[in-house]
Image (tube, rainbow, N blue to C red):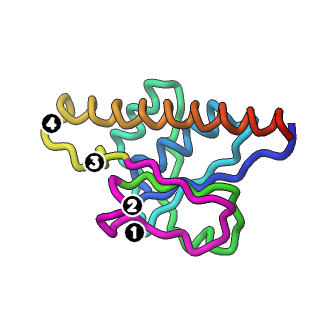
Amino acid sequence: MSDRKRVLFVCTENACRSQMAEGIACHLHGDLVEACSAGSRPTSVNPLAVKVMDEMDIDISAHRSKPLAEFAEENFDYVITLCGSQADGTCPVFPGEAKEHLHWGLPDPAEAQGGEEEVLPVFRQVRDEIRARLDEYVVGLRREEVLH
């Protein structure tokens, strides 16, 4: 198998979705993917994102929210935005080089209302959707490797 694909996961705050995607990609698909994450307005990693990732035995507690500018001089095979909608104008644009841009429209679990018991299922749902999309994405990468 050739070199790992470099993937940058992007959302606005780099607090939930992109952090979960980075963690899942590195933990489950690290043989094929080198993953990073960043945001246009980074804040801090959401403790509930850490909690639902821990349920998968993936520790993202040491992750930090990073600005897109930190990666502007780097090249990526894929930049994947995880915002709710590109049409609403809030989805960040990566200023650096990428061979391909993908958009996975996912709701921000941090916007869920209620106490932890009501909010955790939303975080789990988004986490599970990210995992499903990553699994599908990696199947495509593996197929690409076989063809080349």
Mark 2, other Cα within 10 Å: few <14 / some 14–19 / many ≥20:
many
Q: Which is nearer the eye, 85 or 44?
A: 85
Residue matched to label 2: 13
Region rendered in magenta: 84-105
Query: Which kind of residue does numbered mark 2 sit on?
Result: Glu
Secondary structure found at label 2: loop
Cα distance in 3D space between marks 4 and 3: 12 Å
Q: Is residue 44 left or right of residue 1?
A: left
Q: Which is nearer the eye, 130 or 18?
A: 130
Cα distance in 3D space between marks 2 and 4: 21 Å
Residue matched to label 1: 41
Within the image, what quadrant is residue 26 found in?
A: top right
Q: Is residue 92 magenta?
A: yes
Above or below, comparing residue 1 to residue 86 in the picture: above
Residue matched to label 4: 115
Above or below, comparing residue 130 to residue 105 in the picture: above
Cα distance in 3D space between marks 3 and 1: 14 Å
Task: Residue lying at the far front in this picture: please name it.
Answer: 147
